[in-house]
Amino acid sequence: MPAFEEARSIVLENIIPLESQLVPLHNALGRAAAEDIAAAWDMPACDNSAMDGFAVRADDCRSLPVTLRISGYLPAGETATEGVEAGCAVKIMTGAPIPPGCDAVVPVEETEETSDTVTLTRTVSPGQHIRLKGEDVAAGTLFLAAGRRIGPPEISMLASFGKALVPVHRRARVGIVSTGDELLELGAAPRPGAIINSNAHALAAALREIGAEPVLLGIARDNLESHREKLSAGLSCDALITSAGVSAGDRDLVRDVLAELGVEQLFWKVEMKPGHPTAFGRKGNVPVFSLPGNPVSTMVTFEQFVRPALLKMMGHTRIVRPLLKAVLTEGVKKKAGRVHFVRVEVEARDGRLYARSAGDQNTGILNTMLRADAIAMLPADRTAIAAGEEVNIQLVRERLISYE
């Protein structure tokens, strides 16, 4: 039985990134770049004005006040071809190229303009309010590395260099199979002892959140034929997630049927809580994640194993949420031997993060997942962490943290 970190290493070592494809720029959001992309030209492409105002020669403006003749007008998008004579200024708009001979721009609000002259009363320094050619990105500069997630800033930069098609890794198609005769699909008439199949929908949402494509395959009932049908269909996807049926009960058929279908089991059970009975295997390049059936355990194990694995599969290089330090506001006791994942609420004050329990940590208490901002990771070798000690946390929800 592997320790938690060992189990996650086994998972990640057995993940092979999917092939790349070209997609339209507007479809690249959230995907991982499949290639390094460099600037095709300088940006800005030429020296240009950072302000609406007047392009001038700084040498003409040493003795103030000075009145210059307006010899031209340059809006953005036009080309500056003619030089500016001594004693002259060119009215210029933001983004317009700097005319030959000019080396400064004076903002319009710092001038007094007539029909054909402009008077300057403030000191003019060479280079002021000029954006230099290539100062943002020089031609040939790498601005998007392979594996980086493409967000709105990356979309803007790609568009700025005319990238209508972007090389990204393909989205993973992930089969989801829930197991158990006790499960009901949404909309079915309730009955005593039955449980609505919420895990499939939670997993589908978690998959969509990272850019994968869930394939809902329904419920495998507690017989071999149903399990073979559903799990076989799942193995035709890029990855397969099963929920429940992975413990050691009489009706826990998942591991046996997966073995029958040719899945090599790489581990079963992990030294962690919740999520102890998690299993992982592989058939060819298809990873198979067998998660516990309890909704809290399902979400915690998805977060720690499935999410980083699928991000790697889809080409991402940042795949594990970073660990932050937070001060516990209350003491916690635990048994030694397993990493404990505790749902916590987090607040920031005085430049530090503080964590407190989100409520009852029983894995049957789902509402603590709604309240939790983070998962605190309590080391396997500790039996107690006192109030005031720091622990590692992973922020898992994008919500405002209150500041005092």
Image (tube, rainbow, N blue to C red):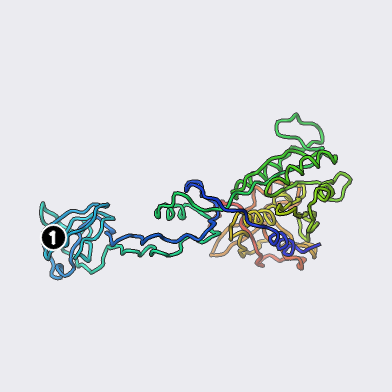
Is 161 left or right of 351, judged from the image as shown? left
Image coordinates of residue 340 in percent, x first then y, are: 74, 60
> Measuring 75% from the left and 29% from the top, which residue is drawn there?
189
Classify residue 229 by image quadrant. top right
Image coordinates of residue 36 in percent, x first then y, are: 50, 61
Q: Is residue 27 above or below residue 346?
A: above
Which residue in the protein does label 1 denote?
119
Res. 404 in view? no
Between residue 3 and residue 232, name the one nearer to us. 232
Is 277 left or right of 119, judged from the image as shown? right
Q: Is residue 389 above or below residue 179?
A: below
Is 302 left or right of 147, judged from the image as shown? right
Res. 149 in view? yes
Classify residue 91 by image quadrant. bottom left
Q: Quadrant of the N terminus?
A: bottom right
The residue lying furthest to the right in this view is: 250
> Measuring 11% from the left and 53% from the top, which residue is drawn there?
114
Image coordinates of residue 43 in percent, x first then y, are: 36, 60
Find numbered disc 1 in the image and state the secondary structure of the residue it sits on: strand
Name which residue type carries label 1: Thr
How crowded pointer 1 is (Cα within 10 Å; few <14, some 14-19, many 20+) is rated as: some
Image coordinates of residue 180 in percent, x first then y, are: 81, 40
Is 138 left or right of 37, judged from the image as shown? left
> Measuring 73% from the left and 44% from the top, which residue is drawn there?
234
Between residue 145 and residue 372, name the one nearer to us. 145
Between residue 279 and residue 81, name the one nearer to us. 81
